[in-house]
């Protein structure tokens, strides 16, 4: 790895007299932590206020009886973004947060016609595995990867830049990329150009669920999600993805960032339309700028008076399209399932019906698709000796009157346990030593996620780029956004990128140098601080 050189610019006389600007960040999720690292490195005073007793938000840990689970994300993808952030603050991601690259990355089990696919980053082996399903598809694996490598490189400037209005689309010359991006097509439609077998397409498109969307509705741009896994790897940070959040918080505190936990924001303080701070149970906290890393729609409807918002009123938020939610099972079990890979995805026999039940019918499917993480064989620290953590995620509808979780929670939990038998886990019920269940109702009420939509606003064409809530929030003054609810969107890599975009905008507004933020990973950064 390249070493990182931090060059601090000497303070001028005027800078020596000036008190550092202060920034208050609401929420210690991945985006808030990444923004705190960058802004503190720039010489600002930074304080994070977090409602929960630990950092990470939806990327935090559950720890009970010696078992450790990620609350939310378990796939760590495209480490380049966070590696870049660590570099410009003078740290090395790989030294600070040890990880292992998985091979196979995951197993996909097809309920549709049977069979399975062990997905490996070795493209020669992967092509051979796909060829067992369809010889023509196997021959096209490398072409798919190469084409999407070009697509990402062409579109990357958009993912790394703010979109503050429709004029940004023209200045970025997006129109030139339309033939490559094919916005009229879905991810599945894009994959039909490469793969005939629906099972192959499913293995390269289930990643749209990282955005909480169906591959049949998700814009074709997001075929880059599966490509990222093959070129940049699927990683397991030791201790889980939550260990990344904890490592970022540790470094932030070492740099001088204040982090206050168990502090629930009760009110955002305004002077006209200008945010000047927040009020919590402990008192008022004021700052020159406010960054919101909390769930966007929930924060707007609960903490910002409706009359202060023009574009994002309660009425308009209610009409927006939201992602699916998730039903979660966190199981601490006796023994180890050595035959299960680290990640396994089971797709239901009637996959299309299952997707319709989630997105259109807002109902529950008996033969539902689900995902299992079996982390303990890779990382024994996740469970007591001789035991395992089993993390189960089931995509379900966000909160809707059709489903009463108070009534259906237990029956659905039992159905999910029965589904696990399809992976060979026929004895899991009797091996459970710890169990925690989260439903969309829990996401909404306990974790303050609007409608329990765990992936925020849906990523359709009407809610992307400048049509998403903007990083410099357009409805209020001195308010900035990071996280899945703003541009570029959901998923850990783009959430980290949202922090870099927002930090740049905020520093520009404060008249600070921002060139150092653009150092490429592996290139020494020259950081002007002061």
Image: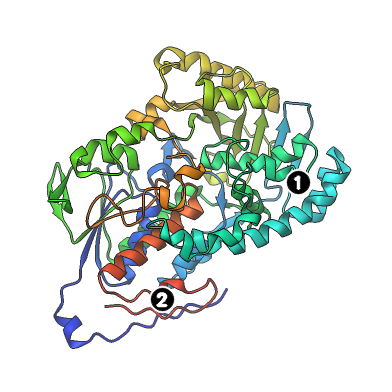
- Name the side, left or right, on which 63 lies relative to 331: left
Placement of the N terminus among the 4 image quadrants:
bottom right
Q: How is the image coloured?
A: rainbow
From what the image shows, is residue 117 above or below residue 424? below
* Label 1 CA crowd tier, 10 Å (few <14, some 14–19, many 20+): few
Check disc 1 and report the residue beneath it: 193
Q: Nearer the viewer, residue 318 or 386?
A: 318
Q: Nearer the viewer, residue 143 or 430?
A: 143
- Is residue 523 in view from this perspective? yes
- Provide residue 390's location: percent of width, then percent of height: 56, 33
Query: What separation in Å lies between label 2 and label 1 (alpha carbons)?
Result: 40 Å
Disc 1 is placed on an element classified as: loop
* Label 2 CA crowd tier, 10 Å (few <14, some 14–19, many 20+): some
From what the image shows, is residue 85 above or below residue 242? below
Name the quadrant containing residue 358.
top right
Placement of the C terminus among the 4 image quadrants:
bottom left
Disc 2 is placed on an element classified as: helix
Name the quadrant containing residue 215.
top right
Dot in front, 2 or 1: 1
- Provide residue 498's location: percent of width, then percent of height: 42, 56
Q: Give the mark nearest the N terminus, 2 or 1.
A: 1
Name the quadrant containing residue 288.
bottom left
From what the image shows, is residue 87 above or below residue 162? below
Q: Which mark is residue 2?
A: none
- Name the side, left or right, on which 172 lies relative to 180: left
- Provide residue 412's location: percent of width, then percent of height: 52, 17
Q: Nearer the viewer, residue 517 or 56?
A: 517
- Provide residue 268's location: percent of width, then percent of height: 18, 46
- Name the side, left or right, on which 29 lies relative to 16: right
Q: Which mark is residue 516?
A: 2
**Contact, mark 2 vs mark 1 (Cβ under 8 Å):** no
Q: Which residue is at 49% across, 79% downward? A: 524
């Amino acid at each position: 790895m390249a070493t990182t050189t931090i060059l601090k610019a000497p303070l001028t006389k005027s800078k020596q007299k000036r008190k550092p600007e202060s920034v208050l960040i609401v929420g210690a999720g991945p985006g808030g932590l990444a923004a705190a690292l960058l802004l503190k490195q720039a010489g600002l005073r930074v304080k994070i206020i977090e409602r929960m007793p630990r950092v990470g938000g939806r990327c935090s840990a559950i720890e009970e009886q010696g078992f450790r689970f990620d609350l939310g994300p378990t796939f760590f993808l495209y480490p380049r973004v966070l590696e870049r952030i660590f570099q410009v603050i003078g740290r090395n991601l790989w030294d600070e947060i040890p990880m292992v690259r998985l091979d196979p990355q995951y197993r996909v089990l097809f309920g549709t016609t049977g069979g399975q696919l062990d997905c490996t980053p070795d493209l020669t082996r992967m092509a051979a595995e796909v060829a067992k399903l369809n010889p023509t598809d196997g021959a096209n694996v490398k072409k798919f990867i190469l084409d999407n490598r070009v697509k990402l490189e062409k579109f990357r400037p958009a993912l790394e830049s703010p979109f503050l209005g429709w004029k940004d689309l023209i200045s970025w010359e997006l129109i030139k990329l339309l033939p490559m991006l094919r916005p009229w097509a879905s991810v599945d439609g894009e994959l039909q150009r490469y793969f005939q077998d629906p099972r192959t397409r499913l293995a390269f498109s289930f990643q749209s669920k990282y955005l909480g969307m169906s591959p049949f509705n998700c814009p074709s741009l997001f075929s880059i999600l599966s490509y990222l896994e093959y070129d940049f790897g699927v990683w397991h940070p030791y201790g889980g993805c939550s260990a990344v959040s904890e490592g970022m918080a540790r470094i932030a505190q070492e740099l001088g960032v204040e982090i206050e936990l168990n502090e629930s924001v009760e009110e955002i303080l305004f002077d006209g339309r200008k945010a000047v701070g927040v009020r919590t149970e402990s008192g008022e906290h004021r700052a020159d700028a406010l960054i919101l890393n909390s769930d966007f729609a929930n924060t707007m409807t609960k903490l910002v008076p409706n009359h202060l918002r023009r574009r994002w009123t309660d009425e308009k938020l209610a009409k927006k399209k939201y992602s699916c939610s998730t039903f979660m099972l966190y199981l601490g079990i006796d023994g180890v399932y050595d035959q299960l890979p680290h990640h396994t995805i089971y797709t239901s026999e009637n996959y299309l019906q299952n997707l319709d039940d989630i997105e259109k019918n807002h109902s529950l499917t008996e033969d539902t698709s689900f995902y299992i993480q079996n982390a303990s064989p890779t990382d024994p620290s996740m469970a007591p000796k001789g035991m395992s953590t089993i993390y189960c995620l089931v995509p379900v509808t966000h909160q809707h009157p059709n489903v009463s979780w108070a009534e259906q929670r237990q029956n659905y939990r039992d159905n999910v346990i029965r589904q696990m038998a399809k992976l060979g886990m026929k004895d899991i019920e009797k091996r459970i030593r710890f169990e925690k269940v989260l439903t969309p109702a829990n996401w909404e009420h306990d974790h303050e996620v609007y409608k329990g939509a765990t992936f925020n606003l849906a990523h359709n064409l009407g809610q992307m780029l400048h049509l998403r809530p903007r990083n410099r929030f357009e409805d209020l003054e001195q308010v900035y956004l990071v996280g899945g609810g703003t541009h570029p969107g959901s998923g850990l890599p783009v959430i980290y990128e949202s922090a870099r975009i927002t930090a740049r905008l905020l520093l520009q507004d404060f008249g600070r140098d921002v060139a150092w933020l653009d150092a490429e990973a592996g290139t020494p950064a020259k950081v002007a601080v002061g």
